[in-house]
Image (tube, coloured by chain):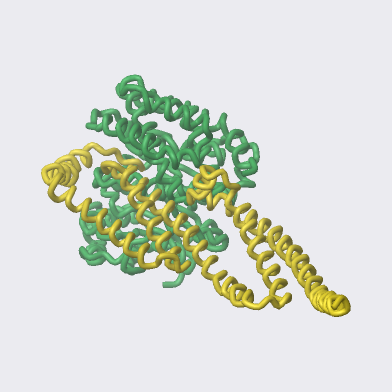
Chain colours: A yellow, B green
Amino acid sequence: MWEMIGGELDHAVHELAQHFAHLLPRLLAMLIIALLGWVVAYALKVTLRGILRIAKFDRLSDNAGTTQILNKLALPSSSELLTRVVFWVVWLGFILLGVQVLGIVGLQEYISRFFLYLPRLFAALFIVFFGLVAASFFSRAALLAAVNADSPSPGLLATLIRTIIVLFAVTMAFEQLGLAERTILVAFAIAFGALMLGLALAFGIGGRDLAKQFLERRFLKEKEEQKQDELSPL
Amino acid sequence: MGEVDLLVGVPTHNNAKTVGETVQGIRAGLLKYFPRERAVILNVDGGSKDGTRDVVAAASINDVQRSSDLYALRTLPCISTVYGDTPATEVALRTVFAAAELLRARACAIVSPESTNITMDWMERLLRPVYRDNFDLVTPVYRRHKFDGLLLRNFIYPMTRALYAKRLREPYAVEFAFSGRFCSHLQEMQVWDHDGGGVGTEIRMTIAAIAGGFRLYQTFLGTKPHLDRGTADLVAAMRQTVGTLFWSAEPNFPYWSANRETEGIPTCGAEYDLTTEPIRVNRKRLYQLFGSGVGELEPVLKSILSPQTLEEVQGIAKMSEEEFRYPHELWVKTAYEFASSYYKSVINRDHIIQALAPLYRGKVYTFLLENRDASGEQVEANVEELCLTFERLKPYLLDLWNARE
C-alpha cells in the first residue's frame, strides 16, 4: 500500500514537473511580451507627449474647458492623462497577449472582446473631447455675439448652448460604448424635448407680454434711436 | 488701349445714388489738372442691382465740359467691369491693380463712390505727388467731427504709429493714390494671402508701403462723407482694421521690433481738421455696454488679459457714470495684451477681436466725457498724449510678444 501511495506521489510530482516544464517557457514568453509591451507603451507615451506639446494640446484643452473639469476632479492635465491612458491601454494589450500565450482555456474569448472594444473606447473619448471643444467654441461665439448685440442674458444663452452640445456629445459617446444605449437615448430625448418645450412655454405663454415688449423695444423704437446716436468708428 | 499715364479706380456696389456725381468729379479733375496725360477711369462693380453701372456709363464727358468750361485734349475713357456677384473690397482692388499693371499706369488713384463732396482738386492732390514727385503712396487727411472716426483716433492711428514709427493719420484709407512701382511690389509680395477673409486690404497695403520703405505722402481732401451714419457696425469695422493690424504685426515683426524714431510724413494741407458742432451721442449706452461686456465676458477676458490688467478693467467697470475713466495707460496695456494674445492665438482670433469691442466702448465713453467741451486743438492734444503712451509702452508689447507661452 505504501508503495502505491509512493508511486502515485511520484506520478503526481512527475506530472506537476511536466506541467511546470511546459508552463515555464510560456510564462517566460509572457514576461518577455509584457516587458516588450512596457517598452513599446513607454516609447509611445513619450512620443505622444512630445506631439501633444507641439500641437499645443493643453491650450486646446484649456479652451475647451476640459482642464477646469480635470482640475476639479484633481486629475493631471489633459495631455498627461491622455498619454497615461495610451500607456496603460497599450501595456494592458501586451499583457493580455502574453496571457493568451499561457493557453488558459476560456480567457481567450475575453481577451478578443477587449481588443474589439478598444476602437469604440477611443472613439468615445474622441467624441467627448471634440464635443467639449465644440461646446466651448460655440458657447463663446454666442456669448460674444450676444454681448455685442446687447441681447438680454448672454451668459444664460452661452450656458444653454454649451449644455446642449455637451449632452449631445456624451449621449453619442455612450452610444458608441454600447452602455445603456436606449436609456441614454430616451433620457436625452426627454431632457432635450423638455428643455425646448419649457423655453417655448416660458416665452410663449408665461412671458408673452414681456416678449412683446422686448421685441418691440428691440426691433422698433430703441433700435431706431440707437442708430441715430451711434458714432462712425472709421 | 495700350498704355496710360493715370488710372482712377472706382469700386462700387449699389451706389447708383452717388456714383454719377463722383465720376463727373473725377473727370473734371483729370481734365483740369492732367489734360495732356493719357488717363482712364475704371469702375469695378461687385454685382450692383440698382443700375450703378448704367449711371457710370451715362455720366457723359459733355456734361463736365458744359458745366466746368473744361475741354478734353485727349479721349478720357470710362470703363465699367464686374468682378463678381457680391461686393469684396479685396477683389475690387486687385482688379484695379491688375489693370494698372497691364496698362503700365504711372500713377493710380482709388476714389470711393460715396465721395459726393469730391472737388476738382482731389485729382491734383492725390495724383500729383505720385505722378510728378515720385511718391509711392498718398493717403488722405479728412476734416472730421471731433467724435467721428474714434476707432481710428483711439486705436488704429496710435498703434500703427507706435509700431511702424510713422505719423500716418489715416492708415485705413478709402481714397488713396499709389505708384506703378508700389503696385508691382504688392503683386509680388502676395499681400493678398491673408487668413482674415479678405478684409482690411487698405490697412495691409499701408503697412506694406511702410515696411517696404516706400515714399509716403498725405493730402488734405476736405470733409469725410458718411452717408449712413447709423449703420456703422463696430465689430465689422474692428475686424477690418484691428484684426488686420494685429495680423500684420506677425509677418512684419522684424520691422517693427527694431527701435526707430517716429517720423512725420510730408503733408499737403492741414494735418488734422476737427469740427466741434454739437451732435447727439448716446453716452449712457456706451457706459452700459462696457459694464455689461466686462461682466459677461470675464471668462473670455481671463484668457486674453493679464490678471493685473483684468483686475484694473473690472475696477473701472464698477465706477459711476460721472467718475468713470479708462486711463490711457490701461487702454494701451489692454491693446497690447490683445495683440499678443492674437499673435499667440490663445483663443480663436476672431473671438479676440470681438471681445475687444466692449472695452473699446469704455474708451470711447471716456473720450466723449473728456472732450465734451474741448476744442479741436484740445482733442488733438488728447490724441497725441495717447499716441505717446502707445510709443512709451512699446517695450511692454515686445516683452509680451517674446515671452514664452
Residue A212 x/y as whole percent: 12, 45
Q: Closer to the camera, A186 or B242? A: A186
Q: Position of residue B380 (x, y in %)?
A: 41, 28
How many numbered marks, from 0 up? 0
Query: In the rendered image, which quarter contains the N terminus of chain B?
Result: bottom left
* Location of the C terminus of chain B (image quadrant): top right
**Is residue A151 among what the camera can see?**
yes
- Above or below, B253 against B40 in this view is above
Vertical placement of residue B236 versus B299, above or below:
below
Q: Quadrant of residue A231?
A: top left
- Name the residue nearer the viewer: A83 or B368: A83
Q: Is residue B120 left or right of residue A31?
A: left
Q: Is residue B149 above or below residue A32?
A: above
Q: Is residue B154 above or below residue A97?
A: above
Q: Residue furthest front?
A: A1
Q: Quadrant of residue B143?
A: top left
Residue B256 position by quadrant: top right
Outermost residue toward the top in this view: B323
In x, y percent, where is residue A47? 70, 60
Q: Nearer the viewer, residue A194 or A205?
A: A194
Horizontal and vertical percent for residue B363? 39, 31
Horizontal side of A30 relative to A204 (left or right) equals: right
User: Visible in this render: residue B167?
Assistant: no
B388 relative position to B55: left or right = right
Q: Residue at x 53, y 52 (%)?
A: A60
